[in-house]
Amino acid sequence: MKFRFSLSFVALALSASAALAVDFGVHGGYYGNDLKEAFVGADLSLPLGPVAFVPNLDYSQAQAIDYWIGSADFDLQYKTSGGPSYWFGAGPSYRYFTGYARNSRVENVKMGLGFDANAGFGWAAGGIKPYVTGRYVRFDNFKALGAALGLRF
């Protein structure tokens, strides 16, 4: 009984410290290749030692098609003392593209799994953390290379 209580207490303490370390971010940028449009997005950064779990969601619209791209990345982080931090990582991605046939009565939806790879750097400026990131996203016959500027809080 004492062991279970101790284990529960340690798990609760680690969960609370991890929840306090989560950064919320918003970003905007441009995807090239098959999309060739600006995008906006949001992300979370949950540090797990030198690795961070970074789920993110990007949205863009081009030629009446809505592009939703969600990713669940694991980033390896390099922090420097007093300077910028760097990271690179990858993870699975999910696409949800709608609106291919808006002029007809049937709307086609393209969904599917793919992957993405990313790299970037960020720095601290008071209470906010600006960052610059680049991302490559690939699905079956869709690929996009993009860059974004963002802020984490």
Image: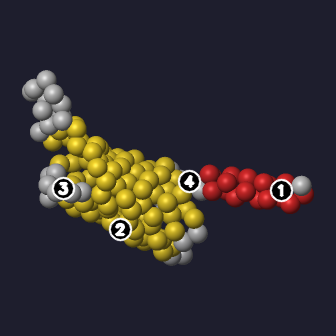
- Gap between marks 4 and 2 measured at Cα: 19 Å
- Gap between marks 1 and 4 measured at Cα: 27 Å
Secondary structure under the numbered disc 1 in the rendered image: helix
Question: Which residue has dot 3 on it?
Answer: 142
**Could you tell which of marks 3 and 1 lies nearer the N-terminus?**
1
Q: Residues within 10 Å of mark 2 (few under 14, many from 20)?
A: some
Please state which of the two labelled residues, at mark 2 or mark 3, is closer to the viewer: 3
Q: Which mark is residue 4?
A: 1
Tell me the amino acid under the disc marked 4: Val
Front residue (pair 34, 93): 93
**Could you tell which of marks 4 and 3 lies nearer the N-terminus?**
4
Labels 3 & 1 near each other (Cβ < 8 A): no
**Could you tell which of marks 1 and 4 lies nearer the N-terminus?**
1
Q: Residues within 10 Å of mark 3 (few under 14, many from 20)?
A: few
Secondary structure under the numbered disc 4 in the rendered image: loop
Q: Position of residue 96 (x, y in %)?
A: 28, 43
Left or right: where 76 falls relative to 60: right
Residue 126 in view, yes or no: no
Tell me the amino acid under the disc marked 1: Arg
Question: Which residue has dot 4 on it?
Answer: 22
Q: Which mark is residue 119?
A: 2
